Image: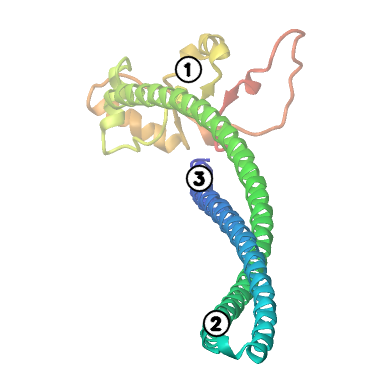
């Protein structure tokens, strides 16, 4: 469970990193959208300026055409005047000098008019070129605007997809957080149970150490049992009756009351082992000891009737198979 918890923590960190990356990408897309909006606004301003420039140029063209028309009328009038002067030249020789001066003046005026017409033609051509250039720029701006609109629509689709993905990540993050909290609660419960089991284990260890100390020191046992237990000349591994039987706590007192006279009896394999112990005790004046001889017990398979409301002692004790 600790490993699963670590995996969940690692998965959460990964999702948080992915969330941070998605947030940064979303921030980048928002900045790009803002830049595109600014670009569109500037493009609209430039387009408006171009429209105003076209309108102003159109007015200038109309004014130039008016001036040209006026010059044309003047030219016609001048031609009429020339004809008139020519007729006057034929009719009045005396006024030839005046007519010549008038003719020269008319020629100068005609030259100026032709010069003005040439300048007007040049201006018209320049204006036409400017109009064509403005129209081309306007077409280019329209194309760029269409591309920007298409890119904006694509970015909006991507933004919607990113928002949906972010929402899914947030939902997954919440689910993962709930799982982590649940796992932490289970882990805390397991830690509590582990602490309880450790306390029980410590208690068992202390009980075991105390019992082992009592057994090693043979505290409360007769002098003869202590002597045999520590004597290397005898098989001191042979147990006494109370060391080979384990009784459930609730039945321990009842069984001990029944077996009390026999609890300190040694359990040996045969008569020879028992006699050897008796001889050791006799030589060293260490008192008496009692024995059960295993080879004298037979497994006859007899059964006994259990009175009502009672439990057979064999059902509440635990003992190794050899005993």
Q: Which label number is shown at residue 57? A: none
Residue 257 spot, x, y in % from top left = 52, 8
Against 145, residue 120 (above or below) is: below
Please name whichever residue, 301 or 198, is drawn nearer the observer in this view of the structure. 198
Crowd band around label 3 with a 10 angstrom C-alpha radius: few (<14), some (14–19), many (20+): some
Taking 276 as reference, is 195 above or below it?
Answer: above
Q: What's the residue at 42%, 27% (across, down)?
A: 198
The foreground one among 3 and 157 is 157
Q: Which mark is residue 102?
A: 2
Secondary structure type for disc 3: helix
Residue at image position (51%, 84%) is: 101
Point out the tag, 1 or 3, that comes first from the N-terminus.
3
Report the colour scheme.
rainbow
- The crowding category of the residue bearing disc 2, from other C-alpha atoms within 10 Å (few below 14, some 14 to 19, many at least 20), is some
Q: Secondary structure at mark 1?
A: helix
x and y percent of residue 31 in the render? 51, 50
Q: Distance between the Cα atoms at labels 2 and 1?
A: 171 Å
| Element type where label 2 sits in the image | helix
Measuring 63% from the left and 76% from the top, which residue is drawn there? 128
- Marks 3 and 2, the one that precedes in the sequence: 3
Q: Earlier in the sequence, mark 2 or mark 1?
A: 2
Indicate the position of residue 134 as horizontal and vertical percent values: 61, 70
* Image quadrant where residue 185 sits: top right
Q: Which mark is residue 16?
A: 3
Task: Compare residues 308 and 60 and report the one nearer the observer.
Answer: 60
Quarter occupied by the C terminus: top right
Which residue bears the numbered disc 1?
262
The quarter of the displayed image where residue 228 is located: top left
Q: Nearer the viewer, mark 3 or mark 2?
A: 2
């Amino acid at each position: 469970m600790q490993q699963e918890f670590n995996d969940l923590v690692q998965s959460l960190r990964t999702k948080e990193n992915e969330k941070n990356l998605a947030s940064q990408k979303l921030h980048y897309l928002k900045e790009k959208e803002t830049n595109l909006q600014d670009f569109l606004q500037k493009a609209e301003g430039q387009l408006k300026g171009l429209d105003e420039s076209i309108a102003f140029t159109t007015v200038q063209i109309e004014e130039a055409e008016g001036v040209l028309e006026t010059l044309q009328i003047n030219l016609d009038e001048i031609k009429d005047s020339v004809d008139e002067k020519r007729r006057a030249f034929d009719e009045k020789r005396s006024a030839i000098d005046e007519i010549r001066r008038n003719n020269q003046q008319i020629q100068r005026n005609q030259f100026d008019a032709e010069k003005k017409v040439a300048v007007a033609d040049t201006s018209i051509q320049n204006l036409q070129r400017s109009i064509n250039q403005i129209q081309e720029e306007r077409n280019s701006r329209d194309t760029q605007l269409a591309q920007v609109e298409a890119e904006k629509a694509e970015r909006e689709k991507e933004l919607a997809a990113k928002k949906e993905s972010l929402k899914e990540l947030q939902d997954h993050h919440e689910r993962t957080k709930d799982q982590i909290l649940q796992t932490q609660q289970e882990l805390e419960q397991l830690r509590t149970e582990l602490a309880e089991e450790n306390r029980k284990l410590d208690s068992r260890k202390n009980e075991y150490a105390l019992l082992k100390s009592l057994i090693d020191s043979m505290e409360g046992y007769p002098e003869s049992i202590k002597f045999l237990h520590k004597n290397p000349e005898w098989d001191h591994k042979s147990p006494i009756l109370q060391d080979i039987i384990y009784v459930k706590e609730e039945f321990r007192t009842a069984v001990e009351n029944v077996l009390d006279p026999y609890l300190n009896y040694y359990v040996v394999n045969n008569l020879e082992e028992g006699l050897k112990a008796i001889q050791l005790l006799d030589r060293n004046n260490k008192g008496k000891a009692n024995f059960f001889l295993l080879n004298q017990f037979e497994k006859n398979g007899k059964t006994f009737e259990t009175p009502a409301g009672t439990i057979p002692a064999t059902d509440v004790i635990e003992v190794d198979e050899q005993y």
